[in-house]
Image: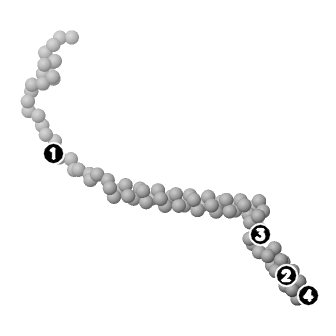
Amino acid sequence: MQKFCRSIALLIIVALLLPGCSMLTAQGRQQRAYEHYVRKSSLGRVKQQKRMSAKKDSKIPVLEPTAPMEATELSGPESASSGGSY
């Protein structure tokens, strides 16, 4: 019986000294909350990077500009209004 009590006392002392018990304190809760925040924000950043890389791949291809075309006709709104007086 004395051996049994001694082993239970040793088990209780070891359980109290484990770091898991420190998580019940205010500082332990703050540390867990911070770890949760870091994990959540890093996962959000990874998701955002994946979305941005997917958007880069699905962009509309850039068309090269063609040579400018010159109009040779003189008829139009410019020629009709140029002869009037103000």
Q: Residues within 10 Å of mark 2 (few under 14, many from 20)?
A: few
Q: Which residue is mark 2?
A: 8
**Residue 56 vertical placement versus 78 (above, below):** below
Q: Does label 4 or label 3 sit earlier along the sequence?
A: 4
The alpha-carbon separation of the residues under discs 1 and 3 comes to: 75 Å
The alpha-carbon separation of the residues under discs 4 and 3 comes to: 27 Å
Q: Does label 1 or label 4 sit earlier along the sequence?
A: 4
Does residue 45 appear to the left or right of 34 in the view shown? left
The alpha-carbon separation of the residues under discs 1 and 4 comes to: 100 Å
Residue 81 placed where, x, y %? 16, 18
Q: Residues within 10 Å of mark 1 (few under 14, many from 20)?
A: few
Q: Which residue is mark 1?
A: 67
Q: Residue at x 58, y 62 (%)?
A: 39
Does residue 71 appear to the left or right of 21 in the view shown? left
The residue at the far front in this view is: 1
Q: Helix, strand, or loop for circle 1?
A: loop
Q: Residue at x 88, y 88 (%)?
A: 3
Asked if the residue at tag 4 contacts the one at tag 2, i.e. Cβ–Cβ closer than 8 Å, the answer is no
Q: Helix, strand, or loop for circle 2?
A: helix
Q: Residue at x 75, y 72 (%)?
A: 19
Q: Which amino acid is tagged 4? A: Gln
Q: Does label 2 or label 4 sit earlier along the sequence?
A: 4
Q: Which residue is mark 3?
A: 21
The alpha-carbon separation of the residues under discs 2 and 4 comes to: 10 Å
> Which callout, 4 or 3, points to the residue nearer the camera?
4
> Which callout, 1 or 4, points to the residue nearer the camera?
4
Q: Disc number at residue 2?
A: 4
Q: Which amino acid is tagged 2? A: Ile
Residue 69 placed where, x, y %? 13, 40
